[in-house]
Amino acid sequence: MIRLNVLLASLLVVCALGLVTSQHRGRKLFIDVEREHGQSRQLDIHWNQLQLEQSALATSSLIDAKARKGLSMQPAPPQRTLYLNVDTPTEKTAMGTAR
């Protein structure tokens, strides 16, 4: 009977240690998940700021101003402009005649 009590007591201690260990591991994992969620929110905010900055930098007036100042570009005069007229092909029906 004493052996059975000692065996059950040791089994109880092992189970209690397992429970404490699993709870500690669960808490650590929960803290890690919360930290990653916070980092994810920060990255989303940063991504939105970058998209806003990109849309502001991509405006045509800003690109035009940078091209004029930084690259010394100027619009082409009408004498240097060449206009091309391209004829669009006519649509054909299934019979091969033009509409």
Image (tube, rainbow, N blue to C red):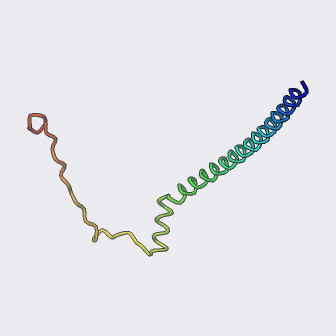
Q: Point out residue 28 in the picture as x, y percentages from the top left corner.
A: 76, 44
Q: Nearer the viewer, residue 66 or 50?
A: 50
Task: Kindly give the residue lying farthest to the top in the view shown.
Answer: 1
Task: Give the total number of marks visible in the rendering.
Answer: 0
Q: Point out residue 9 in the picture as x, y percentages from the top left corner.
A: 87, 31
Task: Kindly give the residue lying farthest to the bottom in the view shown.
Answer: 72
Q: Point out residue 99 in the picture as x, y percentages from the top left corner.
A: 13, 37
Q: Nearer the viewer, residue 93 or 9?
A: 9
67 horizontally vs 20: left or right? left
Task: Kindly give the residue lying farthest to the right in the view shown.
Answer: 2
Where 66 sits versus 14, above or below? below
- Quadrant of the drawing holding the N terminus: top right
Q: Residue at x 82, y 32 (%)?
A: 11
Q: Nearer the viewer, residue 70 or 14?
A: 14
Q: Residue at x 18, y 52 (%)?
A: 87
Where 1 sits versus 41, above or below? above
Q: Residue at x 87, y 29 (%)?
A: 3
62 horizontally vs 2: left or right? left
Q: Point out residue 97 in the picture as x, y percentages from the top left corner.
A: 8, 38
Q: Nearer the viewer, residue 30 or 51?
A: 30
Q: Residue at x 79, y 37 (%)?
A: 18
